[in-house]
Amino acid sequence: MKKIVTCLIASVLLLAGCSTKKETADVDLKELMTSITENTAYEFPAYMEVDDATLETLYGISPDDLESYSVIVPMMNVSATEIAFFKAKDGKIDTVKKAVETRIQQLDSTWSQYLPAQYELVENRVVIESGNYYFLIISEYAEEIGKTCKAALGVE
């Protein structure tokens, strides 16, 4: 009888451990962007931070659908480097995903006919989704930046 009770308790604990969902860390997107753009290991072309109006123009995302965001784009149209961090409001992650996919298609179309080296950056982009967070990283350092972002989010 003791063995049966012990097995039942162990099974319940095992199932409880398997069903717990790891929560994504709360990330300050502006702070994360600053830590990346100020990292001396990376060189970025001259860039600008996107404001609400530009966000709607480039991504078609209303700031009302977001808890926060941080997006940088190049100042001149000779670089495809673009980093976009979004934290969607509850129920709006699909809206953000769809908008980012549309933006990727636009960038793909633009760079596929323009500069092959920049098009390669678009092709090798990193997209990260975790909870209500959705990140797009287009950079020669996309993999490294992606690792930094995943660490900040507490995901692998």
Image (tube, helix red, strand yellow):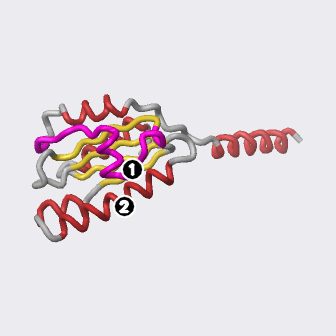
Label 1 crowding class (10 Å Cα cut-off): few <14, some 14-19, many 20+? some
Residue 17 in the figure: left or right of residue 44: right
Does 48 lie within the magenta span? Answer: yes
Q: Nearer the viewer, residue 90 or 12?
A: 90
> Quick one: 41 or 51, which is closer to the camera?
51
Q: Could you say which is closer to the camera, residue 32 or residue 95?
A: 95
- What amino acid is labelled 1 in the image? Ile
Quarter holding residue 32: top left
Residue beneath disc 2:
102
Q: Residue furthest right?
A: 1
Residue at screen point 43% across, 45% down: 62
Question: In the image, is residue 35 above or below residue 19?
Answer: above
Residue at which label 1 appears: 128
Quarter of the rendering containing residue 52: top left
Q: Position of residue 34 (x, y in %)?
A: 25, 31
Q: CA distance from mark 1 to mark 2?
A: 16 Å
Residue displayed at 52% across by 47% down: 92
Q: Quadrant of residue 111?
A: bottom left
What's the residue type where badge 2 is placed?
Thr
Boundaries of the magenta span: 43-66
Asked if labels 2 and 1 touch by Cβ distance under 8 angstroms, the answer is no
Total labels drawn? 2
